[in-house]
Image (cartoon, rainbow, N blue to C red):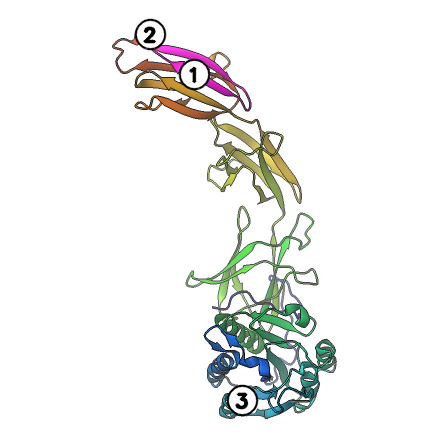
């Protein structure tokens, strides 16, 4: 399954529930999709990469991809190669050639050419992109796509960014896709097109499949997560898309803002109706999303969020493994169990907390506001060591005015217990196993101070 897709060019966005604009020329024949592969056959492709040389792996995966494309209708493919005609050194910065031009049914020719390639030269990426102008014959109803596969950056002093901009400016082709083999050089290609980092064989195969899906379907979607001011500023949360008919998970995407500060564009299979879960706390749902192939759609969900910060004491001292159960106000269902010391995002609203101290601390109507942090700071607890001379039966109570509130039963067969208690006044009531009458019950009162230690002895005399 295609995972997260980085798709850096945009079509006109539409609101999910609004009427979609008609596609220009929708009554005309479907456009011919033309994919030009620009393939790196420079000397560096001999480098070792996981199970084999880069060139060997790239050939194998490209041939597999081409086989899968043979069943597509309304698709033509061409192949341009660079770095394969002249030996290096010296560098030949004009070493690029259209090896197989666009034509119906030419996939066998392209496969044979790729299998016969011998890496020899340097990497003239900018010059190769400039020559692409001549590779696409004139066509009034075509979608021209460039897929550049390379294991390195420009080596001839050219400007691939300027070459890409020129192609787009004159409507020669869509913004190129770049698949970088073996290492991440995203920064060098961000201005050229949509970059995919193929750091492994598996990543290369996924990148190829992802690019083809984008190139051939171009059915895109963006998710606007609105803040309290109805602006799409919320982000960095996982979104799960389910197949509405089967209930199976289709995609997981961590919501992202692109370099223009707007929600990233997702490429989706348009043949599926989706149910969406945005995994905020609590989650937000949108059911029965239907896409139209070849269009861009925007889904809008209200997800204003703020932070809940749990602390122990007014300093940085944290009690390990202390948790709070978080529930929506008035709802008994557990929403989250948050550790003290964590700062966690929640949807704006009111929440009830059950803090798992001894004794329990209950807080009602804790308000979370847009972009703000609500801090809950409870007192630093103390430590109580309870010692018995013999095994017996006992309970621990906190004093609430004139009444006792049970909080803990002593362990019958343990002579010493260490408890972490909140500051307050306590009473322990105990009788040894050997005592045969209730009158031998022992009571002991004690006070717990923040950060202090108390010793309680339950000895029978």
> How dense is the environment of label 1, judged by Cα within 10 Å: few (below 14), some, or many (20 and up)?
some
Residue interval drawn in magenta:
442-461
| Disc with the residue nearer the chain's start (2 vs 1) | 1
Q: Name the residue: 66% across, 41% down.
A: 372
| Disc with the residue nearer the chain's start (3 vs 1) | 3
| Percent of width and height locating residue 401 | 51, 13
Q: Name the residue: 53% across, 49% down.
A: 283
Instruction: Label 1, secondary structure: give it.
Output: strand
Q: Quadrant of the C terminus?
A: top left
Tell me the quarter of the picture where residue 295 sits.
bottom right
Q: Mark 3 points at which residue?
A: 117
Using the image as rendered, state which of residue 204 and residue 324 is in the foreground. 204
| Disc with the residue nearer the chain's start (3 vs 2) | 3
> How dense is the environment of label 2, judged by Cα within 10 Å: few (below 14), some, or many (20 and up)?
few
Tag shown at residue 461: 2
Using the image as rendered, state which of residue 420 and residue 266 is in the foreground. 420
Classified by dominant secondary structure, the portion drawn in magenta counts as: strand
| Percent of width and height locating residue 277 | 51, 55
Task: Give the number of marks.
Answer: 3
Would residue 455 be visible to someone looking at this image? yes
Tag shown at residue 417: none
Spatial CA distance of label 2 from label 1 is 15 Å
Would residue 11 be visible to someone looking at this image? no
Q: Name the residue under label 1.
A: 456
Instruction: Label 2, secondary structure: give it.
Output: loop
């Amino acid at each position: 399954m295609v995972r997260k897709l980085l798709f850096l060019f945009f079509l006109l966005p539409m609101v999910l529930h609004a009427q979609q604009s008609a596609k220009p020329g929708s009554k005309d024949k479907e456009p011919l999709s033309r994919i030009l592969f620009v393939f790196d056959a420079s000397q560096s492709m001999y480098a070792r990469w996981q199970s084999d040389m880069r060139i060997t792996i790239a050939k194998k995966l490209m041939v597999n991809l081409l086989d899968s494309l043979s069943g597509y209708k309304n698709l033509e493919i061409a192949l341009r190669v660079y770095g394969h005609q002249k030996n290096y050194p010296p560098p030949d910065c004009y070493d690029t050639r259209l090896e197989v031009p666009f034509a119906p049914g030419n996939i066998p020719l392209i496969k044979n050419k790729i299998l016969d390639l011998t890496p020899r030269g340097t990497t003239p990426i900018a010059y190769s992109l400039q020559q692409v102008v001549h590779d696409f014959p004139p066509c009034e109803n075509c979608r021209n796509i460039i897929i550049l596969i390379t294991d390195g950056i420009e080596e001839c002093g050219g400007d691939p960014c300027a070459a890409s901009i020129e192609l787009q400016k004159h409507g020669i082709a869509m913004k190129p896709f770049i698949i970088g083999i073996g290492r991440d050089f995203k920064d060098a290609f961000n201005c050229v097109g949509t970059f995919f980092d193929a750091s492994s064989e598996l990543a290369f195969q996924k990148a190829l499949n992802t690019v083809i899906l984008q190139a051939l379907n171009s059915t895109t979607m963006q998710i606007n997560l609105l803040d309290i001011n109805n602006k799409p500023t919320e982000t960095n949360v996982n979104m799960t898309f389910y197949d509405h008919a089967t209930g199976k998970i289709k995609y997981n995407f961590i919501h992202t803002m692109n370099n223009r500060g707007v929600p990233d564009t997702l490429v989706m299979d348009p043949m599926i109706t989706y149910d969406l879960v945005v995994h905020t706390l609590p989650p937000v749902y949108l059911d029965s999303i239907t896409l139209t192939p070849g269009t861009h759609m925007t889904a809008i969900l209200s997800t204003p969020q703020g932070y809940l910060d749990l602390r122990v004491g007014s300093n940085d001292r944290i009690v390990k493994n202390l948790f709070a159960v978080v529930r929506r106000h008035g709802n008994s269902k557990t929403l989250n169990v948050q550790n003290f010391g964590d700062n966690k995002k929640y949807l704006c609203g009111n929440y009830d907390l059950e803090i798992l101290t001894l004794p329990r601390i209950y807080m009602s109507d804790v308000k979370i506001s847009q972009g703000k942090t609500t801090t809950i700071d409870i007192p630093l607890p103390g430590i109580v060591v309870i010692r018995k001379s013999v095994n017996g039966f006992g309970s621990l109570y906190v004093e609430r005015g004139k009444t006792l509130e049970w909080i803990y039963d002593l362990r019958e067969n343990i002579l010493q217990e260490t408890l972490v208690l909140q500051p307050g006044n306590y009473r322990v009531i105990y009788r040894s196993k050997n005592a045969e009458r209730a009158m031998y019950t022992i009571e002991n009162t004690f006070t717990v101070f923040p950060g202090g230690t108390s010793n309680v002895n339950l000895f029978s005399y």
